[in-house]
Image (spheres, grey):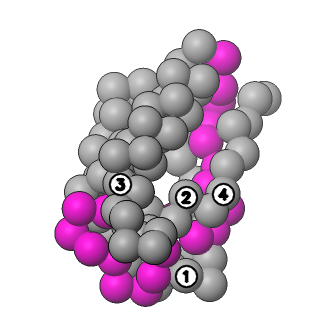
Amino acid sequence: MRFLHTSDWHLGRIFHGFHLLEDQRAALNQIITLARDYKVDALLVAGDIYDRAVPPTEAVNLLDETLRRLVMDLKLPVILIAGNHDNPDRLNFGR
């Protein structure tokens, strides 16, 4: 069984006033490409999916888009574990 193990996406992060969302989108696109090309059996995201407990709408939309592509398009199981920056209830939407 092949897993792709990631963590600390910190979606919605602002670094010194600069929004990182487009860079994060590019990184997530690379993860999707790796998952497809290596034919992994599941993707594991081990915490800190968001950068804060109440993420900005754009970060939530990016996660939703990424999960849709992984789960619906690639038929890939995704396991999300809440980290200290995450609100577990906010991650339950995809159950």
| Residue sitting at the far top | 37
When the figure is inspected, residue 73 is found, relative to residue 9, above or below; the finding is above
Q: Nearer the viewer, mark 3 or mark 1?
A: 3
Q: Please indicate whether residue 7 sits to the left or right of residue 13 in the image.
A: right
Residue drawn at (73%, 36%) of the image: 3
The segment highlighted magenta reads 38-59
Check the picture and name the quadrant holding the C terminus: bottom left
- Which comes before the other along the chain, label 3 or label 4? 4
Q: Is residue 31 visible?
A: yes
- Three-letter amino acid code of the residue under disc 2: Trp
Q: Which mark is residue 7?
A: 4
Q: Is residue 41 magenta?
A: yes
Q: Please indicate whether residue 22 sits to the left or right of residue 7 in the image.
A: left
Q: Which residue is mark 1?
A: 85
- Which comes before the other along the chain, label 3 or label 1? 3
- Three-letter amino acid code of the residue under disc 3: Leu
Residues under numbered marks 4 and 2 in contact, where contact means CB atoms less than 8 Å apart: yes
